Amino acid sequence: MILLRHGQSEFNLHFSATRRDPGIKDPKLTILGRHQAEQAAQALAGEDIRRIIASPYTRALETAAPLARRFGLPVLVHPLVRERYAFSCDIGSPCAALSMSWPELDFSHIDEVWWPAVEEPAPQVEDRARLFRAEMGALEDWAHTVVVTHWGFIMSMTGESVANGQWLRCDPTAPAPASISWRHG
């Protein structure tokens, strides 16, 4: 499967400049982030994509939208692939608000408040990644899936750090990373 990190968000823009949390909850993509999402959809056009899974955060849903248009597929929203809760950007939008903003998507399986109430320890994110790895590995066609997700979740799945709008391939049937360095690279 392909793990795609969302495009640059308003939070990413400010945090990378100051290294301080700017207090932006569930940020949208910047102009660059929207361009990165379009570029990713274009670059993946030759892939045999049959499923698009995205985190419920706005930045992930906005990144998944060009893929959905290009491939004519629905976006399957899956809270398991959300970001590690550690900053203001990891406070999501309530399910009702997401449903109003994205009426074409199904949020019926998601709790109204689907993100944690307190900072999520790294081992908990790694446990979510193991659960998702098992879920995907049980599917026969996992190789035809794009997962639009986040830095911390990709780190938990692969042990690798990727920039906004970048992706990498991940075999969910392969062993999880032996160790993970949780430093932003």
Image (spheres, rainbow, N blue to C red):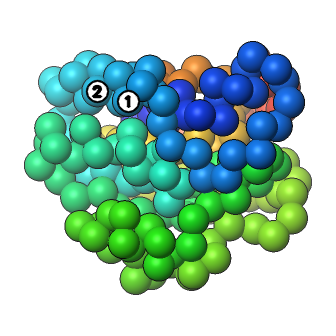
Image coords of residue 34 (percent x, y):
38, 30
* Residue 116 versus residue 6 in the image, above or below: below
Q: Which residue is mark 1?
A: 34
Residue 181 falls in image quadrant? top right
Q: Amino acid at mark 2?
A: Glu
Q: As drawn, is 93 to the left or to the right of 137?
A: right
Q: Is residue 55 visible?
A: yes
Image coords of residue 118 (percent x, y):
86, 64
Q: Residue at x 48, y 36 (%)?
A: 29
Q: As drawn, is 162 to the left or to the right of 37?
A: right
Image coords of residue 135 (percent x, y):
49, 62
Viewer-side residue, 181 vs 4: 4
Q: Are marks 2 and 1 in contact (CB under 8 Å)?
A: yes
Q: Residues within 10 Å of mark 2 (few under 14, many from 20)?
A: many
Q: Amino acid at mark 1?
A: Arg
Image coords of residue 52 (percent x, y):
31, 50
Viewer-side residue, 105 vs 138: 105
Q: Secondary structure at mark 1?
A: helix
The mark lying in front, picked from 2 and 1, is 1
Residue 114 falls in image quadrant? bottom right
* Residue 39 versus residue 134 in the image, above or below: above
Viewer-side residue, 133 vs 115: 115
Q: Is residue 170 visible?
A: no
Q: Residue at x 82, y 49 (%)?
A: 86
Q: Residues within 10 Å of mark 1 (few under 14, many from 20)?
A: many
Q: Which residue is mark 2?
A: 38
Quarter of the image containing the C terminus? top right
* Disc marking residue 179: none
